[in-house]
Image: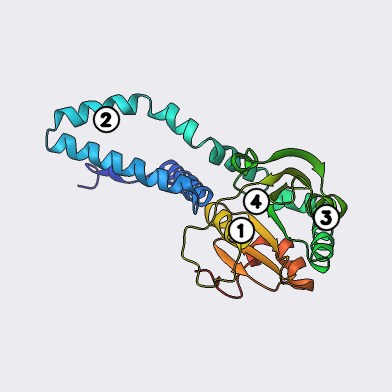
Amino acid sequence: MLGRYAFLLPRFKDLVQILIVAVALYYVLRVIARTRAMQMLIGLLLVAITYLFSRVLDLNLIRYLLEKLFQYGAIAAIIIFHPELRAALARLGRSRMLHLFYKMEEGEVVEELVEAVDRLARARIGAIVALQRGVGLDEYAETGTRIQARMSADILVSIFSPYGPLHDGAVLVEGDTIIAAGVILPLTQFPVADKSLGTRHRAALGLSEETDAVVIVVSEETAQVSIASRGRLERNVVGERLRSALAGPETVGTPARAEAR
């Protein structure tokens, strides 16, 4: 009896392939989680379900239109998910093992950021700095002025100096490089309970909801430093807390849920 259904038993090679596919799917979902790509993926799933129903119910017109759409689906998916695909490949190059080689360099970047934030806060100069993580920020960089400058406290302070041409927007940082300034960020789409939060804080929350970036905000009214990550906002971040939050993105925003949610 078992011999007749032996082909249904998975072999070692099959189990390995299933594991690889499962890991790949998990990785893809992690990359696009909390981004607009997730909404697009849900939309594609709904289209696929609609196509199945059109076949079951024999809705010829709908099936014909969807089949024509699917002919160009692969090309459209590459175009739509281009930023996420590039971010995924970039994250492969930033594994934990390779991360050890960049630890010293990242430490220098963190120190420059901490110094810049401290100087800006003491001078009561408003600022917003977004640190790119796994999800690329190129689409947001297009709204500002492209810059390719090595991260330094002096450059950040000069960018946000009052009456400067780029002081109103955000600065985007990728690794140890400032890639853009004067950037317009999306505001949070969720209702904000704390009415004292200004446009910078709302923009920081908005970007952290759409990407995995860590966003630093310096308030010019209160000189208070805040950090937004994964849709949550941590306020009054000072001293070693700021340094540890920048050094380890997984710790950012964990002490308390955002007051804006």
Mark 4 surroundings within 10 Å by alpha-carbon count, few (fewer than 14), some (14 through 19), many (20 or more): some
Mark 2 surroundings within 10 Å by alpha-carbon count, few (fewer than 14), some (14 through 19), many (20 or more): some
Secondary structure, mark 4, is: loop
Mark 3 surroundings within 10 Å by alpha-carbon count, few (fewer than 14), some (14 through 19), many (20 or more): many
Secondary structure, mark 3, is: helix
Residue type indicated by callout 2: Leu
- Name which of mark 4 and mark 3 comes first in the sequence: 4
Q: Nearer the viewer, mark 4 or mark 3?
A: 3
Kindly identify which residue carries mark 4. Answer: 133
Residue type indicated by callout 4: Arg
Give the residue drawn at x 47%, y 35%: 80
Q: Nearer the viewer, residue 112 or 142?
A: 142
Secondary structure, mark 1, is: helix
Secondary structure, mark 2, is: helix
Residue 125, given in percent of the width and then of the height, sits at 78, 62
Q: Nearer the viewer, residue 36 or 185?
A: 185
- Name which of mark 4 and mark 1 comes first in the sequence: 4
Residue type indicated by callout 3: Val
Kindly identify which residue carries mark 2. Answer: 66
| Residue 22, label in figure | none
Q: CA distance from mark 4 to mark 1?
A: 14 Å
- Name which of mark 4 and mark 2 comes first in the sequence: 2
Kindly identify which residue carries mark 3. Answer: 157
Is 233 left or right of 78, judged from the image as shown? Answer: right
Is 55 located above or below residue 236 in the figure?
Answer: above
Kindly identify which residue carries mark 1. Answer: 204
